């Protein structure tokens, strides 16, 4: 297939669905890790078209959703108390903190700006030498190169009034955490194609070997997803556990060597707290020496007390694939996009938002 339209072809969708119905003989539970894949599955009605034996559950691959409550509070603190120019991707603004969101802080007068790239924040820092500029660096491995590059660029150019508040998380440790959760019943994974575009696929071989599960690196269009599901089901039906690459038009085994080099130059791997899930060992990035001066936590000595998540929100169970969004008693009631209890209801990659906007499903 050469053109984008082919990945949305009704004929190919019908063909893959027909093959799935022929192949499947027993129930299987498959997790798509990425929130972008979740939105595509729900928005395009794919979940309703799959054989009843194929159950798709939604994983922790939404970086906004897993950004800890404490990190939102830190960002609000920097904007309000330290009078920094806080820059962020738009998704982060409506995510609730323990007391308020960044959007509420902005409405109260804090200087909070929506940017499309951290390099824009470096430019703002150069143009405003009398202001401290902080970029809220959230994301999986996909956004890590740009955030790393912004710090390296600021360092090279001597821009000392720039820093990042880092909340980077990594996919392979999250898959391991899901598999080791005692409530988990996942039998196969669709891995996030864009993450593998950056990092390659080598990190997934040990997971396949350790847990004896199929992992298929998959794209985001309807045909991508159906082909990835079909590849996973075929392995499961044969009792196989392999790593396969459905997204080969983009993903290479070695990933993007230049992007990986930039990440490793700027970041080191650390333990990371995931909102609704807890701390996962070696699952995040932090700036390493000699770039610690560009770490907003260090620069401003930020120490915000951790606050417990709302007990009414089951986001953690949704992110681990244990429950579907509509199984939450507050879904569409006390929790809506305009009044969210948790991040999955407001993020553009959040499973709860996908179901709220696009799904008519209320029961399995």
Image (cartoon, grey):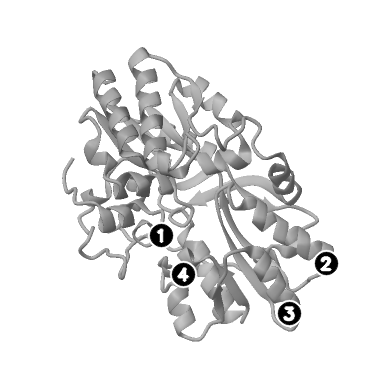
Per the model, the C-alpha gap separating discs 2 and 1 is 34 Å
Q: What element carries label 3?
A: helix
Q: Is mark 1 on a helix, strand or loop?
A: loop
Per the model, the C-alpha gap separating discs 3 and 2 is 13 Å
Residue 41: tell me if it is visible.
yes
Q: Contact (CB < 8 A) between labels 4 and 1?
A: no
| Label located before the other in sequence (3 or 4) | 4
Q: Residue at the location (83% across, 68% down)?
A: 158
Q: Which of marks 3 and 4 is in front?
A: 3
Per the model, the C-alpha gap separating discs 3 and 4 is 24 Å
**Residue where numbered disc 3 is placed:** 127
Counting from the top left corner in percent of width and height, residue 22 is at 25, 19
Counting from the top left corner in percent of width and height, residue 215 is at 46, 28
Which numbered disc covers residue 347? 1
The 10 Å Cα crowd at callout 4, few under 14, some 14 to 19, many 20 or more, is many
Q: Residue at the location (36% across, 49% down)?
A: 39
Per the model, the C-alpha gap separating discs 1 and 3 is 31 Å
| Label located before the other in sequence (3 or 2) | 3
**Residue where numbered disc 2 is placed:** 157
Counting from the top left corner in percent of width and height, residue 18 is at 26, 26
The 10 Å Cα crowd at callout 2, few under 14, some 14 to 19, many 20 or more, is few
| Label located before the other in sequence (2 or 1) | 2
Which numbered disc covers residue 93? 4
Q: Contact (CB < 8 A) between labels 4 and 2?
A: no
Q: In which quarter of the image is the C terminus?
A: top left
| Label located before the other in sequence (4 or 2) | 4
Q: Name the quadrant containing residue 334.
A: bottom left
């Amino acid at each position: 297939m050469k053109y984008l339209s082919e990945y949305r072809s009704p004929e190919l969708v019908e063909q893959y669905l027909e093959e799935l119905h022929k192949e499947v003989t027993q129930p299987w539970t498959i997790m798509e890790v990425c929130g972008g894949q979740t939105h595509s599955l729900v928005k395009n009605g794919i979940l309703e078209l799959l054989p009843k034996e194929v159950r798709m559950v939604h994983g922790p691959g939404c970086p906004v959703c897993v950004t800890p409550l404490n990190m939102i509070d830190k960002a609000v603190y920097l904007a309000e108390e330290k009078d920094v120019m806080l820059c962020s991707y738009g998704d982060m603004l409506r995510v609730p903190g323990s007391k308020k969101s960044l959007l509420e802080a902005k409405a109260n007068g804090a200087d909070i700006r929506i940017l499309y790239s951290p390099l824009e924040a470096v430019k703002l820092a150069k143009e405003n030498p009398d202001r401290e500029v902080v970029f809220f660096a959230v994301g999986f491995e996909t956004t890590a190169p740009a955030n790393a590059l912004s710090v390296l660029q600021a360092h090279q150019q001597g821009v000392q009034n720039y820093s990042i508040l880092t909340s980077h998380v990594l996919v392979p440790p999250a898959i391991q955490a899901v598999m080791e959760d005692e409530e988990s019943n996942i039998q196969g994974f669709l891995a996030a194609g864009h993450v593998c575009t950056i990092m390659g696929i080598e990190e997934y071989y040990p997971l396949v070997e350790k847990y004896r599960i199929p992992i298929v690196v998959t794209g985001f269009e309807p045909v991508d997803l159906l082909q990835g599901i079909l590849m996973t089901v075929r392995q499961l039906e044969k009792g196989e556990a392999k790593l396969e690459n459905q997204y080969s038009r983009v993903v290479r085994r070695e990933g993007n060597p230049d992007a990986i080099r930039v990440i490793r130059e700027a970041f080191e791997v650390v333990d990371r707290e995931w909102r609704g899930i807890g701390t996962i060992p070696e699952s995040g990035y932090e700036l390493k020496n000699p770039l610690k001066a560009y770490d907003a936590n260090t620069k401003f000595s930020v120490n915000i007390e951790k606050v417990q998540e709302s007990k009414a929100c089951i986001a953690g169970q949704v992110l681990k694939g244990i429950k579907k969004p509509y199984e939450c008693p507050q879904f569409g009631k006390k929790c809506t996009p305009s009044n969210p209890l948790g991040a999955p209801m407001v993020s553009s990659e959040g499973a709860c938002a996908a179901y709220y906007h696009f799904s008519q499903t209320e029961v399995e």
